[in-house]
Amino acid sequence: MAGTSKMTIAELLKRKRQAGKITMLTAYDYPIAKFVDAAGVDVILVGDSLGMVVLGYESTTPVTMEEMLHHAKAARRGVSRALLVGDMPFLSFRSSTADAVKNAGRFVQEAGCDAVKVEWKHGIEDVTKAIVDAGIPVMGHVGLTPQTAAAEGGFGMRGKDAESAARIIGQAIALQEVGCFAMVLECIPDVVAQEITQRLTIPTIGIGSGPWCDGQVLVTYDLLGLYDRFTPSFVKQYATLGTTIRDAVTAYVRDVKAGTFPGTEHTKTLAPDELARLKQELG
Ligand code: KIV
């Protein structure tokens, strides 16, 4: 397990300089955040993947600020060491710069997040700069950006040809220039991720983007086997908790129906004198 001192942005930047790997995972509630934090993960993201893996939406676009804040507050209560990042949901930073700054501020003031994350969109540099200027650290996100993926032709890999690879490299550099402290690279070829990692002075954190990023992130529900609609090919599943839950609940249903739960060890019985008194009082 990693050290116990509070993770900072300065420490993440130092890791990049010293070529130490950064770990990041998502969490949306108190118990998972607590386990993830205790395992030594450096950055915990309250991702808008919340919408799909917890709330059951078909995509991340319906997720609201109120839903994000509700879950970010719960995760905050479980995190004592990791850097906690709130993911700006779809419409929270696209209508106006003032709204974007206000919503980023809500993640910090109301939910106690240490930073926010924004997905790339055209013109995001100004919005990002305004959030950074307001004193809120921002993590960028380029490559596959799920909030706009459907409108951009689906969830496949981005940056496979020279033109789109150059575009993504330019986006990452632009976001670094306006003050982002780290960059998520989602679903881009390993060599493009390597190129970005070499060009940026801030850490890159890859998902489905190969091993040469400065760190890695996964959706925790994918890693734990808790989301069964689909599992992306880049996910390594470290546990099958969905099966564990179903088996445990099946056993509970069987025990209740068979009358074997609750057993004597789960039942409070009265001592003989207490029983006698109760019977007398009940008449
Ligand atoms: O919402 C999310 O979980 C994310 C990660 C996949 C980086 O953006």
Image (tube, rainbow, N blue to C red):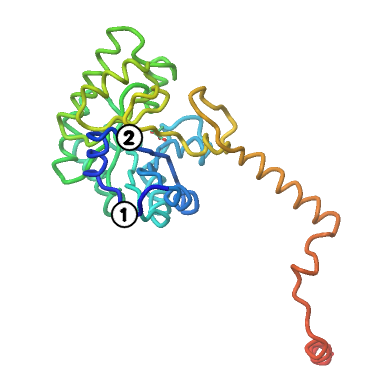
Residue drawn at x 58%, y 29% as measured from the top left: 229
Does the beta carbon of the residue at mark 2 sit less than 8 Å from ligand 1?
no
Name the element at disc 2.
Answer: helix
User: Callout 2: few (<14), some (14-19), or many (20+) C-alpha neighbours within 10 Å?
Assistant: some
x%, y% of residue 158?
37, 16
Element carrying mark 1: loop
Disc 1 vs disc 2: which is toward the camera? Answer: 1
Q: Is mark 1 within 8 Å of ligand 1?
A: no
Pointer 1 local density, CA inside 10 Å: few below 14, some 14–19, many at least 20: few
Q: For this view, does 232 lie left or right of residue 148?
A: right
The residue sitting at 41% across, 45% down in the picture is 67
Q: Which of 61 and 176 lies nearest the eye of the viewer?
A: 176
Q: Are marks 1 and 2 in contact (CB under 8 Å)?
A: no
Amino acid type, residue under disc 1 in the picture: Ser
- Give the x, y percent position of residue 196: 26, 21
Q: Position of residue 135 (x, y in %)?
A: 16, 46
Rendered image: mark on residue 5? 1
Q: Residue furthest front?
A: 18
Residue under pointer 2: 91
Q: Amino acid at mark 2?
A: Leu
Q: Quadrant of residue 179?
A: top left
Instruction: State which image quarter holds ligand 1.
Output: top left
Instruction: Name the residue nearer the viewer: 99 or 198.
Output: 198
Question: Which tag, 1 or 2, sits closer to the chain's start?
Answer: 1
* Residue 259 placement, left or right of 17: right
Distance of label 1 from label 2 (alpha carbons) = 35 Å
Q: Residue 140: image x %, image y %? A: 27, 32
